[in-house]
Amino acid sequence: MLFINPMWDNEAERIGKERCTRLGYALHTISDLMGFIALLLLLGTAAYLGYRGIVGGFHASLLLLLPIPFGLAIVSSILYRFSWVVAHRRGFHYDYDSREASWLEDGQRRTYKCNDAA
């Protein structure tokens, strides 16, 4: 997805990914922030281009501002996908029916459900 990543199904998925791999979770968080900033930049760029078009002084070279938010959104999407690659390498799996996250740690399967104590 461009700009906004899919939401977590449940807190168990989010906390399970965080416990499985801190790096993957950090990449996921950074990608969410980058996507949000890219969306704000897109809206700001569109508003600025509209303003310059109405007031005057619009130049075709101003269209070179548009690739910036899209480039940031593409980098955000790449980070998001890489965060899941890192999690899947650690054996992360989320069961949507039971709302349980599991992963491999030290050769053993670890699980997390929302009702588990911290």
Image (cartoon, rainbow, N blue to C red):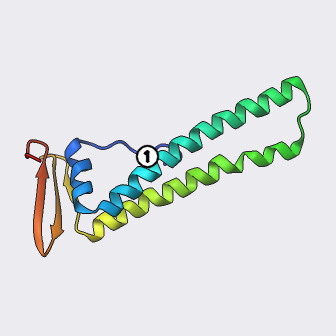
Instruction: Say which amino acid is labelled 1.
Output: Asn
Dividing the picture into quadrants, the one containing residue 37 is top right
Lateral position of residue 88 relative to residue 27, left or right:
left
Instruction: In the displayed orientation, state which residue is furthest to the top.
Output: 54
Residue at point 46% right, 52% down?
Answer: 31
> Where 36 falls versus 109 (above or below)?
above
Name the one closer to the observer, 2 or 76: 76
Residue at point 87% right, 24% down?
Answer: 55
Residue at point 51% right, 54% down?
Answer: 76
Instruction: In the displayed orientation, state which residue is furthest to the bottom.
Output: 107
In the image, residue 39 lies at what x, y percent?
A: 57, 39
In the image, residue 38 lies at what x, y percent?
A: 58, 44
Q: Secondary structure at mark 1?
A: loop
Lateral position of residue 74 relative to residue 92, left or right:
right
> Where 104 falls versus 56 (above or below)?
below
Q: Which residue is mark 1?
A: 5
Residue at point 29% right, 66% down?
Answer: 88
